[in-house]
Amino acid sequence: MNANTPTSLTPATAGDHDLFEVLDASDFTFTRRAWVDAAPTRVYDLISDVSAIGRWSPNASDVTYDRGAGPRVGSWFSGRNHKDGRQWSTRSQVVRADPGTAFAFVVGGAEDGIVQWSWSCHPRGRGTVVEQSWQLLRLDSVLGSTRGDLDALRDYMTDSVETTLLSLARWIAENPVVTGRSGR
């Protein structure tokens, strides 16, 4: 053996530079929640209307269901995303649509998607606790190629979800549904 021959091949130690071979997509997930002053059915109607996401999300815009589609399992929609001065389009498929309760979609589609976004609505007092979850379904170099890249993406998306939930709560407070004479 000469000085240039490795004496052993060992996997990289766990850390920021771990490559896909030692990463598990299920490590990259989170859920955040916020209370909003609206009934679960209203919250569901707002979040399942994907064209409205630009009101609250700091990263998504121009989201529209395909012609004739809507908040039903199997429906597809397109949207634009932006981050760090870059823009790209995505195609997503609805994988759960339980009115008043839960809405979820997978970026890239149910069969070969990359990320699942989920929303759930839980009645609490006169309003709703809204949970929004993000889950990496599979590893893909478009999202990053090391643990550090994916940790940074998860942290960025966590901040985005927190902003989205706060913006949703604020929008609901500023746009109450007025019914009859009671003002609510």
Image (cartoon, grey):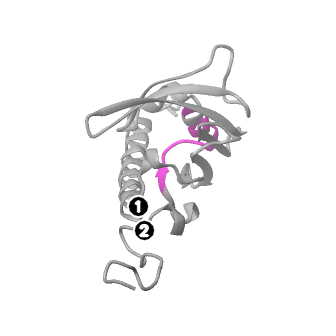
Crowd rating for badge 1 (residues with CA inside 10 Å; few <14, some 14–19, many 20+)? many
Q: Residue at x 62, y 52 (%)?
A: 123
Mark 2 or mark 1, earlier in chain = 2
Under mark 1, the amino acid is Thr
Q: Residue at x 48, y 57 (%)?
A: 32
Percent x, y of residue 20: 50, 61
- Disc 2/disc 1 C-alpha distance (Å): 5 Å
Under mark 2, the amino acid is Asp
Q: Specify the quadrant of the image occupied by residue 154.
A: bottom left
Q: Is residue 175 visible?
A: no
Q: Residue at x 66, y 45 (%)?
A: 102
- Segment colored magenta: 33-46
Residue 18's disc is 2
Residue 113's place in the image compared with 51, above or below, is below
Crowd rating for badge 2 (residues with CA inside 10 Å; few <14, some 14–19, many 20+)? some
Q: Specify the quadrant of the image occupied by residue 146.
A: bottom left
Q: Is residue 9 visible?
A: yes
User: Is 44 on the left or on the right of 8, as rendered?
Assistant: right
Q: Residue at x 42, y 79 (%)?
A: 13
Say if the magenta span includes residue 128. no
Tell me the SS state at disc 2: loop
Tag 2–tag 1 contact (CB < 8 Å): yes
Residue 17's place in the image compared with 170, above or below, is below
Percent x, y of residue 26: 58, 63
Nearest the eye: 182 or 128: 128
**Quadrant including the N terminus:** bottom left
Residue 16's place in the image compared with 152, above or below, is below
Q: How many marks?
A: 2
Tell me the SS state at disc 1: loop
Nearest the eye: 62 or 3: 3
Percent x, y of residue 35: 48, 53
What residue is pinned by disc 1? 146
